[in-house]
Image (cartoon, rainbow, N blue to C red):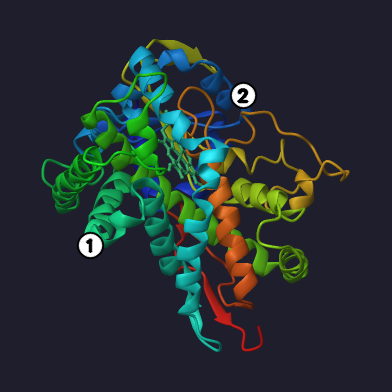
Amino acid sequence: MTTTGSLRELADLQAFSADPFTTMQRLYRDNGAISTVGAGPMRFRVVLGTEASAYILANSHVFSWEAAFAALTPLTGRSALLVNDGDRHRRLRRLVTPAFTARRVADHLDTVTRHIETAVAEWAPGDAVDVYPALRRAMRLATLESLFGSAAMERSEGLDDWLRDIHRAIDTDVVGGSIERGSGSPVWRRALLARSSVHRWVSAEIERRATQDDPGNDVLGALLRGVDGARLTDDEITDQLVSLLEAGAETTAAQLSWLLYCTLRDRPLWTRITAAIAERHAVEPDPPGLDHVVSETMRLYPATAIISRTVATEFTLAGQRFAPGDLLIFSPYHTHRLESVWPEPHRFDPSRWDPGSERYRRPAPHEFLPFGVGPHRCVGANFATMAIKAAFTAIARRIDGELMTTDARPVGLIGMHPSGGIVIRIDENH
Ligand code: HEM
């Protein structure tokens, strides 16, 4: 590599860390499918465009998740789904998936609605409220209750702070594995302490459950019950629950905030969708159009903006060689805004998802991937989609307001959220 080349790659790393979203657009325009960013242990390849995404998604066997996330296992635990490969991953996944079937998830929607209602009740008419922190807290509590049951909520003091500390370390760590960690950065040290507190808390919940006759209907109960006589060990269950808490709450809260932003910004759409919700009885299915609005929000603002992979087996893509150990990232955010796939890509247009509309086009899996694709596709995708819709419905039934945030900028790569929150002036007349 020339000195000019390496200087450019370091400058690109800086640009990527400061604003990954516009930097990806520029890298794609300047370099095409593959750009090299950074140097040494902080070197990674940004792989963009549909052909490259399709290759990555069709060739899971050339990547290792274990290698990609080895540095994170002190936080996630060794048995978390995301840090395992091959047979071990398949076994874990087979035992975790039944906890997230649509039927099981439906049991948790009242919980989501209740926590959202509590948050909304705090918003007084005339107030200008940043709804993001409140929704984030509500989704954390709802996730916690769905995982551990309502009785555990009284014992959950401290958990919220610990989870925030863990999330901060994972989110800053996602590219290159060492932006913030170093050997003892304060962010990393705090997260490690938080992890051991969460681990102790979850272990105590499992022990308490062992003394009861019925394992319960929450996710912990489903994991303890197992599948066809097989179940995870207590340690494996602890690792799942810690990572489910981390993976579930931040992403869902971020996605919900973008959903509110996108709908409140389009007043005729907001009026239409809230009227359709108001006409329905609570137990009726979603009003027509809500699915399209959710998909379109996930297209423009996917809460998981980038996904990383580590190469396990050498391959060549777009004329470039990838060697074992190389880190690469690809991006739902960037893919979802490609003009070659999405006409007027930056326009929020739910009719793209309406099979009755002439704008409708069913995307291929590598063109629309808010939950990833392949063996590690989000195990909580059902939960997330149903929870977001239940939460949005609860909000739309109770508040109206004027969106004060006019130009929300995304920040964060896992749990990509609006940097200045979403400020709404709550209407007097609702
Ligand atoms: C809108 C919300 C969500 C988004 C955008 C999202 C996105 C993703 C993505 C893109 C992946 C794939 C990562 C990869 O391929 O490397 C993933 C994996 C995962 N997600 Fe989600 N997720 C969301 C909500 C949830 C929820 C609610 C849960 C659980 C309660 C959850 C649990 C997980 C787990 C455990 C994995 C790892 C699966 C595996 O490695 O086999 N996620 N998620």
Q: Amino acid at mark 1?
A: Glu
Q: Which residue is mark 2?
A: 51
Horizontal placement of 135 versus 344: left or right?
Answer: left
User: The N terminus appears in which quarter of the rendering?
Assistant: top left
Q: Is residue 30 above or below residue 78?
A: below
Q: Is residue 404 visible?
A: yes
Q: Is residue 87 above or below residue 143?
A: above
Horizontal placement of 126 versus 361: left or right?
Answer: left
Question: For residue 310, which numbered disc appears in the image?
Answer: none
Locate ligand 1 by image quadrant: top left
Question: Could you say which is closer to the camera, residue 362 or residue 186?
Answer: 362
Q: Residue furthest front?
A: 213
Dot 2 crowding, Cα within 10 Å, few <14, some 14–19, many 20+: some
Q: Is residue 26 visible?
A: no
User: At 49% across and 50% down in the image, what residue appears?
Assistant: 108
Percent across and percent down for residue 420 are 45, 68
User: At 52% across and 57% down in the image, what residue appears?
Assistant: 110
Q: Which residue is mark 1?
A: 157
Based on the displayed image, in which of its 4 quarters is residue 278 positioned? bottom right
